[in-house]
Image: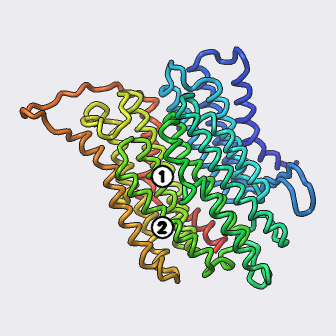
Amino acid sequence: MNKDWILLLPVLFPVLSGIVLALPNIFPGKKGRWGFVAAVCALELVFMLAAAGGSHEFTLVRFSDRLAFVLRPDKLSLLFGGLTAFMWLASAVYSGKYFGHGGEGGKIYQTFFLVSVGVIAALCLSGNLVTMYMFYEMMTLSMIPLVIEERTKEAVHAGFEFLFYSIAGAFLGLAGFFIFYGCGISLEFVAGGHITVQAAGENKELLLVACFLGILGFGSKAGMFPLHGWLPVAHPVAPAPASALLSGNVTKMGVLFIIRIVYYVAGADFLRGTWVQYAFLALTMITVLMGSVIASREQLLKRRLAYSTVSQVSYVLFGAALLHPAGMLGALMHVVFHSAVKNTLFLSAGAVIHQTGCKRADELSGIGKRMPVTMWLYTLVSLTLIGIPPTSAFLSKWYLAQGALAADIPVARYLGPAILLVSAVFTAAYLLPLSVTGFLPGKEADGREVVYRREKESIWMVLPMAVLTAAAVGFGIFPNGLMRFLNTICGAIL
């Protein structure tokens, strides 16, 4: 019996569940609806692991021999799809308490919360550029209701900006696809890519332009300079659970698209040593440094974390741009570690805002005494993101530096590790002061100790953060299983 239909489960199940949730008189209580959403996300994780973990192929529509909508997962699909499904589950558990009994987190938000994870599942399972592009655009549209949930003027403006940057970037990528197709290049994903210098012939420069358009265009979703502007605008106005997913996972879909273009359509051998590789590396290094510097000067907490994402996701792109096994291993490791860390940081920021109403870093003196569990989790993942051993991001940054030193690119060899080190210093500068003033707030002018009221920290908000923190720290201590899996991906494409 053909079991390829299993690929439809992680796509259709959450989408149909979201539609059912939107019907009148279905789970009228908000707690009941969030319980339903969490249950759907738990099953979605199972369906995604089952679908992406096997050898299946499902053709949705075939237009011609060269053009079809196809789902065909591989190990890269399993990595990105499984990670996304897990983070959606963590967000669903957290959101039930975060939204509480207020006006936020209603049926529209919950419906699109489920629809978006189904669409992203299809994006991760896609077998060619055409299919991936279709679901990429659907992902953008399905995330807008999450961004504008609060319906303020600022939220609506952020929604339009998110849409503008996403569509503008996708159009650049689409132009690249047209060039690939016109030059007879297959749009199917094959580990190692399709293009060789001999096969490119007189179309070599045109194909290089196509690759760069794809990198630049889909770099917008990953927050890469110069199309990074939506991130610091959208994150502060979106609800914290949505900000966490935007930062920790939606940005990774831009990364996934770039990896597919570079390693599964063009091929590392075709791009190595070309102006495309050098331009790609330059953009990533500019973004890493720029995001870190701006984050260190920002006082609005969620905007500070947004600029941190601008910087940290370009760590991943830097590793991908090196076209070296060690750099790529570091990049894929950082995909996992950054997702766990950044989801935790935004969820902890959301817990603080939910409990205290304070949104600025300079308003949170003593917060460690008021919300000690939340702030300890924040501090642990902050140390992880800085790269303090033995936490996980130390490993990913180590391999990124090793890849830069081993790559035959003088600028990357000398400037790359230096920028990674400087960025780590800035990361400490914008994350740790909140912990220091939170736990050691100082005394009053007359020398008296300040007494802080202990806030009630919900187990349903703390639990997802604790699990993600344990993963962020634990992968650094026990990395072998994950590294073996990621090495199989690197070995297939390099």
Q: Residue at x 40, y 62 (%)?
A: 394
Q: In this rendering, is residue 32 above or below 320?
A: above
Three-letter residue code for mark 1: Thr
Viewer-closest of 36 and 222: 222
At numbered mark 2, what does the secondary structure look like: helix, strand or loop? helix
Which numbered circle lies on residue 285? 2
Mark 2 crowdedness (10 Å alpha carbons): few <14, some 14-19, many ≥20: many
Which numbered circle lies on residue 309? 1
Percent across and percent down for residue 401 are 44, 72
At numbered mark 1, what does the secondary structure look like: helix, strand or loop? helix
Side (left or right) of 229 relative to 308: right
Q: Residue at x 78, y 53 (%)?
A: 131
Side (left or right) of 346 relative to 321: left
Percent across and percent down for residue 399 are 47, 69
Mark 1 crowdedness (10 Å alpha carbons): few <14, some 14-19, many ≥20: many
Three-letter residue code for mark 2: Met
**Residues at circles 1 and 2 in contact by the CB criterion of under 8 Å:** no
Which numbered circle lies on residue 388? none
Image quarter for residue 388?
A: bottom left
